[in-house]
Image (cartoon, rainbow, N blue to C red):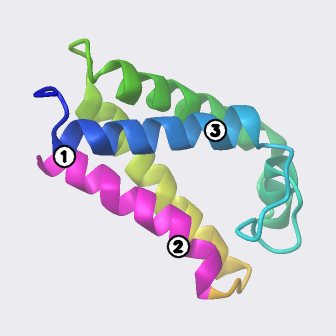
Amino acid sequence: MSWLTIQTALQLVVGLGLLNVWLLRSKSATSYRGGEAKTLKQEFAEYGLPEILFWIVGALKVGSGLVLVAGVWTPLPVDVAAGIVAALMAGAVAMHIKVSDPMMKSVPAALMLAMCLAIIGL
């Protein structure tokens, strides 16, 4: 498995994680949702964000997730996708702070941010 490097492992973790959250679990309650939200769409409302931003962020995250996963086997702009996700995750951490969430709710976004920065740096 010479293709499996730290960078490719991170790409798979971040990419598959994004696809899981946005395509499979977007309507599921988790202990990491902001405020009292039970779904991703409700989470954006908790943050006071317009609904259109939910769709824009979703498209950016799903698209970036696909690039990160496919980029393991095909030359794609993985650094660009990781940069987009890093910026969105920094925004997610800021939104958790905005609604005075406990720090634990920010952990997944902070970890995704760190993994994206590592992808860019490798």
Label 1 or label 2, whichever lies nearer to me, is 1
Residue 23 belongs to the span the image colors magenta: no
Instruction: From this view, report whether residue 56 is shown above or below residue 6.
Output: above
Question: What predominant SS class does the magenta segment belong to?
Answer: helix
Residue named by callout 3: 20
The picture places residue 84, in percent across and down from the top left corner, at 40, 41
Q: Is residue 17 left or right of residue 33?
A: left
Residue named by callout 2: 107
Q: Tell me the distance, in whole angstroms, between the alpha carbons under discs 3 and 1.
A: 21 Å
Residue 31 placement: quadrant: bottom right
Instruction: From this view, report whether residue 83 is shown above or below residue 58.
Output: below
Q: Tell me the distance, in whole angstroms, between the alpha carbons under discs 1 and 2.
A: 21 Å
Residue named by callout 1: 6
Q: What kind of residue is marked 1?
A: Ile
* Residue at (41, 44) in percent of width and height: 13
Residue 104 belongs to the span the image colors magenta: yes
The picture places residue 44, in percent across and down from the top left corner, at 78, 55
Sequence-first disc among 3 and 1: 1
Instruction: From this view, report whether residue 33 is shown above or below residue 6.
Output: below
The picture places residue 94, in percent across and down from the top left corner, at 56, 71
For disc 2, the neighbor class at 10 Å (few under 14, some 14 to 19, many from 20) is: few
* Residue at (57, 29) in percent of width and height: 62
Question: Which structural element holds mark 2?
Answer: helix
Which range is magenta? Answer: 103-122
Q: Please name whichever residue, 20 or 35, is drawn nearer the observer in this view of the structure.
A: 20
